[in-house]
Image: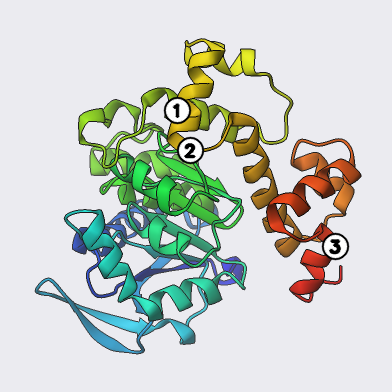
Amino acid sequence: MTIADNMIRIGVLVYPGCLRSGAVMPIDVFAIANTLAGIRPASSRPVQFDAFWVSARGDVMQEVGGLHFQARDISTQKLDALMVPGIDHRDSRQLDTLMAELGPEQALLHDYLQGDGLLVSSCSSTSLLARTGQLDGRRATTSWWLSAYFRKHFPQVLLEAEELIVQDGQLVSSGGVTSYIDLSLWLVAHFAGEELRQLTAKILVVDANRNSQAPYIAKAMMQDQGHAVIERARRWLNQRLDQRWTMAELASYCHVSQRTLLRRFQDATNLSPIHYVQQLRVERAKALLETTRLSLEDITARCGYEDVSSFSKIFKQWAQVTPKDYRRRFGLRF
């Protein structure tokens, strides 16, 4: 964090096909926060925000849908947070095509996460991040109408589709298009405190306390819609990877019989709930093995198992390698 000079530097990534409002509005939110912070006495004044556009393609005048953004080369910038606007697209097929053309941006996201700055995605840009593999085994959200698409293409990600904002370490993601306003306010609170966030939200005339996409979900519009029961079950399971649970508890939460739940889950995922959880726990373990110095005992506990030997067998079954060999494969000796 670069608070030594009382300045928080936030880059907003502009790229071909990004949502124009997602590139513009955060800049305005931080400008309003700065104005409100400046009213306070100097002794109690919080940090200031320096928000600007950045590009993965060098110092360029980036043109997006008729708007021109003077973007700085991100490789020359030290950021506390990088915000990635959503991708402007009509349907999931076009989304696939557009993401395939964003090679420099995908490489940037992968490299950026080698540092300690926050990476903040919104709407469909969470799919762009997921394509790099950096979200595997981690919690995230995306626009509610893309949830079925996202689960199909990125099954290793712990998607919480009804949540508006989800943080997992340095990764922060948000839901539908205008949630970039919520993300900007979240960053205001993260770096400068809740009071400034609330004041900024009042000036913007937005609800600073909304935390769910559920009120906005229209099930009939969801692409490749799966059964609502399965979405409910997945969310419940994703939140309990480190806990014991029973099929009876899961079925009760979903308001169906165990037999119905098993049948619907198998039809939707080709897995039983137990195998689904095992797969997610292994992906979570992979992320912990790659990014932490935790012992195998600690990782086993965080993935809901008590015995290292038993978990190692399950890990090997799904990953085709033991946890120790997995770390060695990536040159991780800790």
Q: Position of residue 101 (x, y in %)?
A: 30, 76
Tell me the residue that label 2 is attached to: 269
Say which quarter of the image contains residue 240: top right
Residue type at numbered disc 1: Ile
Would residue 287 be found to the left or right of residue 159 on screen? right
Rendered residue at 33%/89% (across/down): 59
- Count numbered badges in the picture: 3
Badge 3 or badge 2: first in the primary sequence: 2
Q: Which mark is residue 230?
A: 1
Nearer the observer: mark 1 or 2; the answer is 2
Badge 1 or badge 3: first in the primary sequence: 1
Q: Position of residue 293 (x, y in %)?
A: 82, 61
Q: Which mark is residue 324?
A: 3
Say which quarter of the image contains residue 53: bottom left
Most foreground residue, 319 or 62: 319
Residue type at numbered disc 3: Lys
Q: Secondary structure at mark 1?
A: helix
In contact (CB < 8 Å): disc 1 and disc 2: yes
